[in-house]
Image (spheres, rainbow, N blue to C red):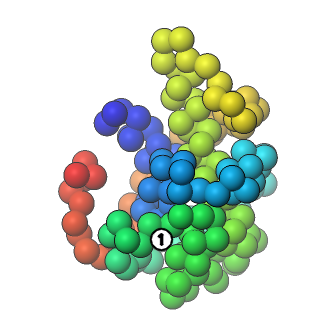
């Protein structure tokens, strides 16, 4: 499981993982409409460029209260969580994205990162509703996304409750 966690952590910025990962991992927390929106999203070079810039713009912003009670249960909750951080909405918008686009892109990266990992396992199959083209895009840009995650690792919860292994 640690290997899977490292794979997903490398796929998106630390800020969004702290805000969004609980809902992405617990599929029951995300409404069907949100799941469809994420699955229908197409990862593109243009989107990745904007996402990368937004992630750089978000560097240094701190998320408060990252306890279990604050987890996002929908895309709209995740958008509201990010937008509640002073300067975060402007940081994302200055990169040419809305906060919702940023959130959907992040969820898509996580979904396709999980799918890429699943396909690497013995007998692995593409999960239903996941686009092979998006998985291929994720694989082709994995190094870029890892660099993004490392560049933003100062965007953390202020409570300091997790150690470096997330435990």
Q: Is residue 10 above or below residue 82?
A: above
Q: Is residue 93 above or below residue 165?
A: below
Question: Around disc 1, counting alpha carbons within 10 Å, would you say few (fewer than 14), some (14 to 19), or many (20 or more)?
Answer: some
**Residue at (73%, 56%) from the top-left corner?**
33
Q: Nearer the viewer, residue 2 or 94?
A: 2
Q: Nearer the viewer, residue 31 or 124?
A: 31
**Residue at (56%, 38%) from the top-left corner?**
113
Residue 80 lies left or right of residue 95; in this view the side is left
Question: In the rendering, at what x and y percent does residue 123 appear?
Answer: 53, 11
**Residue at (64%, 71%) from the top-left corner?**
76
Q: Find the residue positioned furthest to the top.
A: 123
Q: Which residue is mark 1?
A: 59
Residue 162 lies left or right of residue 82; in this view the side is left
Q: Find the residue positioned furthest to the bottom.
A: 86
- Indicate the secondary structure of the residue bearing disc 1: loop
Is residue 155 visible in this depiction of the protein?
yes
Residue 33 lies left or right of residue 74; in this view the side is right
**Residue at (61%, 47%) from the top-left corner?**
109
Question: In the rendering, at what x and y percent does residue 83 appear?
Answer: 58, 81
Quadrant housing the N terminus: top left
């Amino acid at each position: 499981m640690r290997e899977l966690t490292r794979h997903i952590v490398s796929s998106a910025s630390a800020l969004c993982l702290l805000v969004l990962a609980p809902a992405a991992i617990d599929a029951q927390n995300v409404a069907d409409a949100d799941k469809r929106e994420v699955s229908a999203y197409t990862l593109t070079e243009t989107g990745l460029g904007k996402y990368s810039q937004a992630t750089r713009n978000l560097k240094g912003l701190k998320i408060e209260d990252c306890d279990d009670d604050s987890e996002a249960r929908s895309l709209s909750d995740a958008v509201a969580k990010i937008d509640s951080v002073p300067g975060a909405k402007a940081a994302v918008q200055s990169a040419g994205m809305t906060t919702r686009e940023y959130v959907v892109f992040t969820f898509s990266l996580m979904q396709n990162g999980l799918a890429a990992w699943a396909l690497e396992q013995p007998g692995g199959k593409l999960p239903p509703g996941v686009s092979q083209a998006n998985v291929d895009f994720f694989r082709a840009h994995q190094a870029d996304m890892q660099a993004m995650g490392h560049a933003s690792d100062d965007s953390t919860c202020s409570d300091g409750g997790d150690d470096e292994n997330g435990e």
